[in-house]
Amino acid sequence: MKHSFLHRSLSVALALFVMMSTLSFAFEKHFCGNKLVDVALFTEAKGCGMEIPSNTENTCCKDEVDLVKGQDQLKLNFQDFDLELQQFVATFIYTYINLFEGLQEQVIPFKEYSPPNLHYDRQVLFETYLI
């Protein structure tokens, strides 16, 4: 039971690790002067209301975007492998799937047998005890 739980939890953790390592996202920050006003993830940061709509350089507010880029090296194509490696991978998958077949059900011939009813204990009745 412990091995099965440990195996499942480790598999889920590794799957989440792979998923999170390939995920890209951006943090947007809005500064008013030197003071951080708002931070947003996946959306635009809300302004402080002091932005000047024109494109002048004299604004006290600024926006920063920090991009956290995930890796994209996990994109593999089965066709990129040579024939020998394709055969190995196909054979490995086939044998791994067939490795965990269920066991045959054990047949217990006396499962439905009920023992005879005992009305009295003969050993105690005749005071015959095995030593």
Image: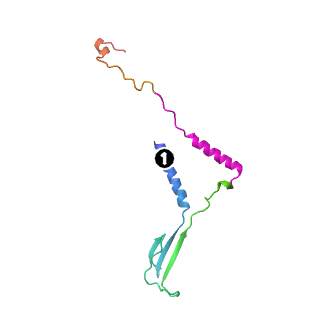
Image point (71%, 50%), residue name: 83
Where 72 falls versus 130 (above or below)? below
Query: Which segment is the magenta one?
Result: 80-107
Percent across and percent down for residue 100 are 55, 40
| Left or right of residue 87: residue 57 | left
* Magenta stretch secondary structure, dominant: helix
Percent across and percent down for residue 68 are 54, 68
Quarter placement of the N terminus:
top left
Q: Is residue 104 magenta?
A: yes
Pick whichever, 63 or 128, lies toward us.
Answer: 63
Where 34 falls versus 131 (above or below)? below
Q: Is residue 78 magenta?
A: no
Image point (50%, 71%), residue name: 27
Q: Residues within 10 Å of mark 1 (few under 14, many from 20)?
A: few
Percent across and percent down for residue 56 are 52, 88
Image point (60%, 62%), residue name: 72
Pick whichever, 77 or 74, lies toward us.
Answer: 77
Farthest residue to the right: give it.
83
- The three-letter amino acid code for the residue at tag 1 is Leu
Residue linked to disc 1: 6
Quarter placement of the C terminus:
top left
